[in-house]
Image (cartoon, rainbow, N blue to C red):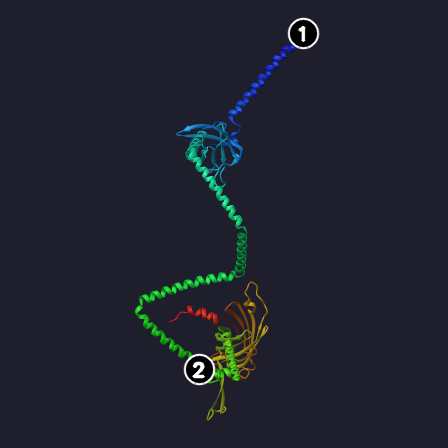
Amino acid sequence: MRLESSSSVKKILTPFRVGLLVIAAGVILFFFLTFVKKGGMKEDESIRAHAFFRDASGLGARSRVQIAGIPVGEIVGISLEGTRARVDMRLRRDVGVRENATLTKRSESLLGDYMLDLTPGTEDQPLLKDDGEITRVIDAQGMEQIFNSLAAITKDIEAVTGALRAVLGGPQGQGSIEAIVQNLVKLSEAVEKTVRENATRLDQILANVEAVSGDVRKVTEAERASVHNIVQNIDTISADVRDVVASVKKMVGENEGEVAGTMSSLKETLAKLDRSLANVEQITNDIKEGKGAAGALLQDERLQQKVTDTVEDVADFAGRLTNLQLEVGLKVDYLTQQGAAKTFLGVRLIPKPDKYYLIEVIDDPRGTVETVYVQQNPPAAGEPVVQKNTVTKETVKFSAQFAKRYSFLTLRFGVIESTGGLGADFTLPIKFPYYTRWLEDALALKVDVFNFSIEALRLPRLRATLRFTPFEHVYINLGIDDALNSPNRDSLTNRLVSGRDFFVGAGIYFTDADLKSLLPVVPTP
């Protein structure tokens, strides 16, 4: 019983298993056909594109689109639009197809199957949009066109062979070929005999030619530059000769009647030239013998030395004169006790950087104090016969000083405000940051001592000035004048005649180069 039951179960399970296998195979086939129909690329991984072909034969759905032999897409449909075939395809998005992409129809085998080669395009072009058109299409010829071309070529070959058969066929053609072959044999025998008989002579000729060529090569290599220059000179000379000949021909043709007169004038000119040369020869002989001033100058060494020394002195003086720098300045100081302004107009002559000459014209509100003796005859009661009076006059004063610089100290002496005096300038060695180099001497202390013999002063006149130059050509100063004496005023005019006074002022100065640049823009009447 058990055996019968087990066998019955097997009979039932075997058909069931076969049925399951058939069902599974059907499901797999269904999904495979669905995948094949749908295509191997997902829509999010690809883009659609289309192109137009004049001939789409050999192309079909699922035909490959490849780059360098690697599939990058497939054809999904072919339709007719007008007289052209529209080919729709799906391409991989990561390929980066550009708007200047190119499609080429290429034969895949001799059986008539075709595929498409894709060139993605250049990166400077924008990407092709979805469902965009590839406009650059290259159609390949179909197999029928190839076979037609081969048939035409075969007909041409048959025509050529027929013509050859007509020419070379028959007894006459064979005789012509035999005659040509015999002539070739005789010609080759004659050439062989000639070469054999003249082999030695040909060897000697070749050796001579080789020797001559070697000599020529040596000469040309050694004198290559000279030969090049000679050729250039010959070209230049020939061009000049052509120009001269052309000019002469033109002159003779245009002035044929004047040629004779020109020749006679030329003879007279040559005669005058001979006489002039004779005179020049006579003059040179006189100079050589020491005659005349020029001869004495050339023959007398002592005179030559004097002339040389004189020329050197003149050159030295001219050099100093050209190196002399001129500086013009104007300064105005306001005197606080005097209540008036004092004006300086100065000129500095600078022959060297370490010395200069200063000339100034000063308008001083103090004026000059003079002592006048008045004799009264007869004198007034109780008064002396001779009376001493002090008179103050408004006059212009002058200064003329010589200055010499030693490092930061400059010493001056000469005439200061119409009296003898001394002066010293202490240039503080301070370099201001963010300024140019000329501002290294921007801060200076100037001290002047003068008026040693004026009776109105108990002590000499001492003036101290602190000068600051913040900008080129402009400076400001402040100081004290007549610091050693007490203030003394005129009883009538209340003018300060002598004594200390404080002042503050400013000034400008220009060099000769600055004046040259300013003169063109100065208005003139």
> Helix, strand, or loop for circle 2?
helix
Please, which residue is most extreme toward the top here? 1
Residue 450, horizontal then vertical, whole percent: 54, 80
**Mark 1–mark 2 distance (CA, rounded to whole Å):** 166 Å
Please, which residue is most extreme toward the right here? 2
User: Which residue type does callout 1 highlight?
Assistant: Glu
Q: Residue at x 49, y 61 (%)?
A: 227
Report the quarter where the C terminus lies.
bottom left
On the picture, is 23 further left or further right than 160?
A: right
Residue 515, horizontal then vertical, whole percent: 46, 71
On the picture, is 411 further left or further right than 125?
A: right
Q: Which labelled disc corresponds to residue 282?
A: 2
Report the quarter where the N terminus lies.
top right
Circle 2 Cα neighbour tier, 10 Å, few/some/many (<14 / 14–19 / ≥20): few
**Residue 439 or residue 286, whichever sits in front:** 286
Residue 374, horizontal then vertical, whole percent: 47, 89
For disc 1, the marked residue is 4
The quarter of the displayed image where residue 354 is located: bottom right
Q: Nearer the viewer, mark 1 or mark 2?
A: 2
On the picture, is 358 further left or further right than 5?
A: left
Please, which residue is most extreme toward the bottom here? 378
Q: Earlier in the sequence, mark 1 or mark 2?
A: 1
User: Which residue type does callout 2 highlight?
Assistant: Gln
Residue 223 seen anywhere in this rendered image of the structure: yes
> Helix, strand, or loop for circle 1?
helix
